[in-house]
Structure formats: C-alpha cells, structure tokens
Image (cartoon, rainbow, N blue to C red):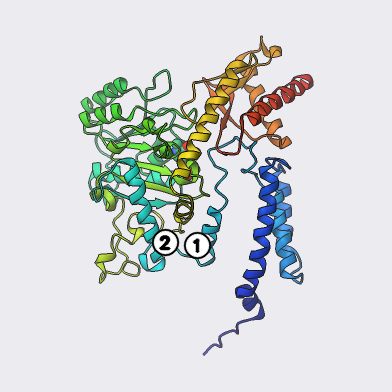
C-alpha cells in the first residue's frame, strides 16, 4: 500500500485561519487606502504597461523567494496588482460597460470565494442557490412577470446568457436539434438580429450550428433601433420562403450607442409571425429600477427570453448575468443531460434547485451573492439612484458636446452611452478616414497617459469615440475635464503630424 504523504507545513500554512485573519485585515486596509486614492483621482485611471512588461512582472512574482514573511509577500503582491490595473473607481473612467462596482459587493464575493460556495447542484451551495432563486423572483417581478409563470437563473456573463437563451429558442423551434443536430436539408434556419447587436449574438449562431452567415440583420430606423415595419416585412419574406426563424434578437439597449428597441411593437410583429422574441437587456435591464427610465423597457415582459447583466448597470463585480424565460416550461429546454453522478434521481424534488440543469456551466460560482449582498444592505432604491445618476450624466455630456464647436455628438443618448467625435478647427478639411484615424490615435494617447479612459467605436465606417458613464462619482466637471484633455492632447497630436 502506498503511504499517504503528510500534511506538510506548507499545506498547514496555506490553510491556517490565522493567516487569513492576518492577511485579510491587512487587505481591507490596503484596499480602502487604494480606493480612497482612486476615487479622488490621485493617480492614473489606466496604469498602462506593455503586455510583455506586465508578463515579466507577473512571472517574477511567481519566482520570488518563498522565505519572506507571509504578510510582506502578500502586501507586495497586492500592491503589484493594484498599481498595474485599471481603476474603474476613478471618476475619470468613462470607458466600457463595466462599472465601478459597489465596493462592498466584493466582500460578499469574498464570502463565496473563500468558502467556495458553488452551484450545479443544490447540495453544493444550498444557501447561495436560494439567493439566486430569490433574486430571480425579485428581478422577474421588476420585469412584470406574474409569480410562478416564468423562470430564470444566473450565468457567467451576458455572452453565455445570450447563447443559452438562443439555444433554447433553437431547440423549441427545431425539436430534436439538441440530440440530432441542425437539419442540413431544406432552407437553413436564421436568427434575425438587431443590425448592431453585440457580437455574441452572431457568435451564438456560430456555436449553435446555425452559422454566422445565417444571422439576418434587422433594418434600423434613424435612431438605430429595429424598425418594426421593416422587421414585419423581413419576417414575412422569410416565412414566404419557408425559412425557419429561430428568433428575433432585439436590444435593450444595443451596445454602440445604447439604442433601445421599441419592444412592444417588436412583440406585436413577432406574435403576428409566431416568432420567438429574445431581448438582450444586458445593459439596459437595470432601467427597470428607475421611475424615470423604466418606460424604455415597456414590453420587455412580452419577450420569450431575455438576458440582463447585473455586472453592468446593477454595479456588481463580474460575472453575474441572468437569463429569463417568460414561459416557465422552457427552463429545461436548453439541455437534456443524464448524469447520475451529479443529479440524484432519488431526489426529484430538487430538480428546480439544481442550477446545472439549466446552465451551460456545471460548477458555477455564487454569481448572485454580491447582488444579494448589496440589495440587502441598501435596498433596490440604490439601483434606481445609480441608473438615474449615470443616465443623467449621459445627457449632460451630450449637452456639453452640442455646446462645443469642436465636438460632434453622433446621436441623442437614451442612456449613459454617448458616441462622438472631436473635430478641431485644424481638421476642417480632413477626409473622413483622417478624421477617423485621428479619433483612434487621440484616444490611445489619452488612455495611455492615464488622464481619462474612454473607448473607440465607429460610425458609417469612420472612427469615433465612445463613453459609458458608469461610475456614479463622475461629475459634470469631470466631463468638462475630458473635453479639455481631448483638446490638449489633440493639439499635441496634430503638432506632431
Ligand atoms: C448588449 C450586450 N450584450 C452582451 C454583452 C456581452 O456581455 P458579457 O461581456 O457579460 O459577456 C455586452 C457587453 O458589453 C453587451 O453590451
């Protein structure tokens, strides 16, 4: 018989609660000091370093001698991470749709991670499974569902959420496609998608065996929302050609400029053609918490499926996204699994609580715990406050762009996403290509300087700039500062050309 190796000193040290206490106390101080500085903009927004340089530092840390005191080694490691990262809590962060999360949410994440409360089956994380179910009920009520009629669950991000919902739509339409695959004979099935949907919709079509070429772009109106009349025509044409339509994938809102589709009108059209309506409300779902903005989602409850990212506008850390089905009967239609080593056939009453039957993930982190924690501390009103504040910043920024001769807003914002261009006098006679490349070059300079963080986009094939105001500590003064920074850096860029 082979001998069992002993519990080494190393193992003991790694598992000692005393070490957790020591380092945990220190970590809270380090994080609070860091956050204080970041929220006051005392450093750079993005700590830009080349990927190769960061790899060297990360690699060196792995090879650092292991004889240093644990606290010191930990402090050094934490300081390295914090000094080289992206500072979302800096009010000058106006970049991707990734929020400055409520810092206290992270403490609930810590409870889940330190004790590794996972899901797949109820027994592995009984309380966090209940947390998720309760949040599904509460969010479902916000959507406007009647209790007991709908279903939902959390998953690891919006892309996975869209994939799961569209998989369900495919299975419902094509019967045994989960087992038999997508039929290769006859007209090939399509997804009709918002023309500017997030790429994960077309990626889903690829993964689902439909093919990315089978995504039909729904035509948009002048505010870049799906035009219901033209959607009606598209669905009518596809029906006349006997093309199976897996779903219409609408946006609430679409990524590029935050355009909210007219959901009631789209639901009417989909009902008329008996087509599954899916709504990607990854970003905009949170508007349901705002008295002022919830009208943007009128009709959402009529969608057959929808997704909603809590790690966007509910201001919790990644990853936490929800999938909802209007019809509760659809909750097990994505997958059919026979796994006696996991799902206990002698406990059929747990089928609703075993999340792995509904999700792509088997092991799933306690994704909803931070949201539950924040909600339990501050109540749902906090989410309304955050939406109202950040959407108002979107409008304020738009007004500033309109008031400036050398900036051009590219649309009227419906939320906290604003796309625009800087058009200094010196670019008056520049070609669209020159104007576009100027935006992208300018952004690169600004973000690498650490002064602000914003993102690139394009409109009509020409480069542009885009902000998402997703830090409630950003003020109108910071937005003035952004314009001033773009002007100054733009001057330098043009001088150097
Ligand atoms: C509308 C929309 N859907 C889906 C996604 C993808 O979500 P995730 O990054 O959580 O996978 C995004 C990301 O920004 C998005 O804007």
Q: Please say if 74 is above or below 234.
A: below
Whether residue 441 can be seen here:
no
Q: Please say if 3 is above or below 484.
A: below
Which residue extends farthest right? 496
Tag 1 or tag 2, which sits nearer the N-term? 1
Contact between marks 2 and 1 (CB within 8 A): the answer is yes
Q: Locate residue 20 relative to residue 196 in the image: left or right.
A: right
Which residue extends farthest top? 429
Residue 128 vs residue 39, the one in the foreground:
39
Question: Toward which corner of the image does residue 469 lie, by quadrant?
Answer: top right
- Residue 120 in percent (x, y) is at 38, 62
Q: Write the residue at 21% across / 25% down.
A: 240
In the picture of the structure, the residue carrying the numbered disc 1 is 112
Q: What kind of element bears circle 2?
A: helix
- Residue 193 in percent (x, y) is at 37, 31
Q: What kind of element bears circle 1?
A: helix
Locate the C terminus by quadrant.
top right
Residue 238 vs residue 426, the one in the foreground:
426
In the picture of the structure, the residue carrying the numbered disc 2 is 128
Q: CA distance from mark 2 to mark 1?
A: 8 Å
Q: How many C-alpha atoms fall within 10 Å of the one at disc 1: few (<14), some, or many (≥20)? A: many
Q: Is mark 2 within 8 Å of ligand 1?
A: no
Q: Write the residue at 61% across / 43% down.
A: 88
Whether residue 46 can be seen here:
yes
Which label sits on residue 122?
A: none
Count of residue discs = 2
């Amino acid at each position: 018989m082979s001998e069992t190796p002993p519990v080494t000193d190393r193992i003991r040290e790694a598992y000692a609660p005393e070490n957790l206490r020591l380092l945990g106390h220190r970590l809270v101080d380090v994080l609070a000091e860091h956050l204080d500085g970041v929220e006051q903009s005392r450093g750079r927004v993005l700590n830009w370093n080349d990927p190769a340089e960061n790899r060297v530092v990360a690699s060196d840390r792995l090879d650092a001698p292991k004889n240093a005191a644990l606290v010191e080694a930990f402090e050094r490691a934490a300081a390295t991470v914090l000094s080289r990262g992206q500072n979302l809590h800096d009010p000058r962060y106006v970049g991707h749709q990734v929020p400055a999360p409520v810092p206290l949410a992270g403490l609930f994440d810590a409870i889940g991670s330190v004790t590794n409360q996972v899901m797949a089956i109820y027994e592995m994380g009984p309380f966090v499974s209940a947390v998720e179910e309760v949040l599904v009920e509460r969010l479902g009520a916000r959507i406007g569902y009647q209790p007991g009629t709908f279903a939902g669950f959390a998953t690891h991000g919006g892309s996975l959420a869209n994939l799961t919902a569209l998989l369900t739509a495919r299975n419902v339409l094509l019967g045994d496609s989960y087992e038999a695959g997508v039929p290769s004979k006859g007209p090939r099935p399509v997804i009709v998608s918002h023309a500017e949907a997030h790429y994960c919709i077309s990626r889903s079509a690829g993964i689902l065996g439909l093919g990315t070429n089978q995504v039909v772009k729904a035509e948009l109106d002048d505010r870049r929302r799906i035009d219901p009349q033209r959607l009606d025509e598209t669905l009518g044409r596809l029906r006349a050609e006997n093309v199976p339509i897996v779903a219409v994938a609408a946006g609430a809102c679409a990524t590029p400029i935050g355009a909210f589709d007219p959901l009631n009108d789209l639901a009417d059209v989909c009902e008329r053609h008996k087509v599954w309506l899916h709504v990607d409300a990854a970003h905009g779902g949170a508007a349901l918490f705002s008295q002022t903005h919830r009208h943007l989602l009128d009709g959402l409850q009529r969608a057959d499926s929808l997704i909603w990212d809590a790690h966007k506008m509910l201001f919790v850390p990644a990853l936490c996204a929800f999938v909802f089905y209007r019809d509760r009967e659809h909750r097990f239609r994505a997958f059919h699994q026979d796994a006696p080593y996991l799902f206990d056939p002698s406990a059929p009453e747990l089928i609703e609580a075993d999340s792995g039957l509904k999700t792509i993930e088997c092991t799933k982190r306690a994704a909803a715990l931070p949201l539950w924690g924040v909600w339990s501390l501050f109540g749902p009103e906090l989410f309304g406050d955050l939406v109202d504040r950040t959407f108002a910043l979107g409008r304020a920024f738009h007004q500033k762009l309109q008031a400036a001769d050398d900036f051009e807003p590219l649309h009227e914002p419906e939320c906290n996403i604003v796309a625009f261009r800087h058009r200094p006098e010196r670019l008056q006679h520049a070609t669209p290509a020159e104007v576009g490349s100027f935006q992208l070059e300018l952004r690169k300079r600004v973000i690498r300087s650490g002064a602000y963080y914003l993102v690139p986009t394009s409109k009509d094939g020409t480069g542009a700039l885009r902000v998402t105001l997703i830090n409630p500590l950003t003020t109108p003064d910071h937005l003035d500062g952004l314009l001033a920074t773009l002007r100054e850096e733009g001057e330098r860029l043009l001088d150097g050309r």
